[in-house]
Amino acid sequence: MEKTSVSQTLSIDFNKNITFLKSLFQGCEDIIFESYQFGADYEQEAVVVYCTSIIQNEKQNLLKMALQDLVSERLSPGIPLTSHDVQHFFLRRGVTERPVKTPHTLKDVSEQIMTGHIIILFDGWNQALSYNSYSVEKRSVAEPQNEMVVTGPREGTIENLTKNIGLIRARLKSSDLKIHYKNAGKRTRTRWAYGYLAGTCDKDMLKEFEKRIEKIASEEILETSYIAELIEDSTLTPFPQFRITERPDVAAAALLQGKIIVMVEGTGTIVICPGMFHEFFQSASDYYQRSTFSSLIRQLRIAGFILSLTLPSIYIALTTFHAELIPTVLLIAILDTREGIPFPAVIEALIMIFFFELLQEAGIRLPKPIGSTVSIVGALIIGEASINAGIASPIMVVVIGLTGIASFSIPQYDFGFAARIIRLPFMILAATLGGFGLLIGFILLFLHLSKLKVMNQSYLGALNLNNTVILRDGLMRLTLKKLLKGPGKKNMFKTRS
């Protein structure tokens, strides 16, 4: 007996198609096979196949509508329906008010069943009818939890790809907004899309992006971060190379700036490509408040990043190698608080940072009602207990607390995580070489950032003072009048050739 392959076309032999599909979906108890007889004498047979867990509840109405329309095509009660009548009816007319596809191969049929289509197979016909009835429960549009603003839109993306694209389309009502759909993975068959503004997005960057995504077509994709990691230039750097947002307004603004956005079915996050160094200090609220205030807040975030990166290292370097640089009164106070501490400053700092990071992770993983309570109470109790036990000094608790607060001021969580990682080698350099070690650390960090590429573009390229973008919307933000169209300058949302 000839073995049936999934790549073969549907057979005229009705039972052969059904037997193969049943063997293919053996053990999948949510795949339903239902037989129907229709015609005046019930001389014709059809089998309906669908995945009950991912389709709408209108299945029965759809089938009745399809078969009743077919029966109404009979010329008279005495003329029986034939397979030719079935083919002619559905190919020429189809079902009223319902788009239909006619897959020809077993592979197409099996894939469409797993993507929420209702498949109808007819006896004596080597094609099938496919109706899209995909429906999975989704949460409604709400304000994103990680990007809240005082003023501005409250809409956030959800786990529905079509609705997310619609939220962006509502803000960019232009035919220049191009959306391309893709499918990834042999098993997941994940539907995802990328978009850009034609005439605004750099052609070379777009070409490079499309070249990279072609290489990941066979990868199993479950979330936007999968795509970001698969197409990024360097996976070893702690610095993120793409921005992540859950706000349609941020995605629309990024498109106007010539960026590429990536969205995946089943996840509410949008990846913005590429992400430059200075863009990780920007927040959606910057553009809904006065420019003076926004610029000051942005400078505060930059200062917070530097403090998060270097504050423990500076303390270790000063107390270990450069005590003469500390004012006498402050030095005496530090020495008094460190009296009886059995560890050097670097070990003391590492212990406190370890417990601080542990508390932070516990607060994230615990249920929301008790997570914040555990973080706050745990930090107070452990800090106080460490001081009383002589494990840590009060000044070290203050330094680590300020470092943690400074890291929370960074809008992008991934960028703040990079500072948390780089903080450790800076502390080791400060403990071994003092201020000279910190200088070496900064030089190595700058060389790393200078070498880092994002979609073949320099990660620090926008920090060039000759670049008008960094002067107008980088380290600070000018007024909207100047930002959008300043005198003698191009529009911020410039069109590229």
Image: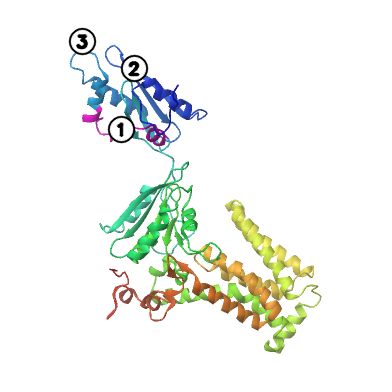
Which residue is tagged 2?
A: 37
Q: Quadrant of residue 494?
A: bottom left
Which residue is tagged 3?
A: 78
Residue 92 among those drawn in magenta: yes
Q: Residues within 10 Å of mark 2 (few under 14, many from 20)?
A: few
Name the residue at 53% across, 66% down. Answer: 239
Q: Residues within 10 Å of mark 1 (few under 14, many from 20)?
A: some
Nearer to the camera, 151 or 194: 194
SS at circle 2: strand
Q: Quadrant of residue 103?
A: top left
Kind of residue sitting beneath label 2: Gln
Name the residue at 31% across, 21% down. Answer: 124
Res. 93 visible in picture = no
Image coordinates of residue 134 in percent, x first then y, are 39, 37
Res. 244 visible in picture = yes
Kind of residue sitting beneath label 3: Gly
Image coordinates of residue 327 in percent, x first then y, are 68, 88
Image coordinates of residue 490 in percent, x first then y, are 29, 75
Name the residue at 49% across, 70% down. Answer: 452
SS at circle 1: loop
Q: Is residue 477 above or below residue 222?
A: below
Q: Nearer the viewer, mark 2 or mark 1?
A: 1
Magenta stretch bounds: 90-113
SS at circle 3: loop
* Disc 2 to disc 1, C-alpha distance: 20 Å
Q: Nearer the viewer, mark 3 or mark 1?
A: 1
Residue 60 among those drawn in magenta: no
Question: Are circles 2 and 1 on residues that touch, CB within 8 Å?
Answer: no
Which residue is tagged 1?
A: 102
**Quadrant location, the C terminus:** bottom left
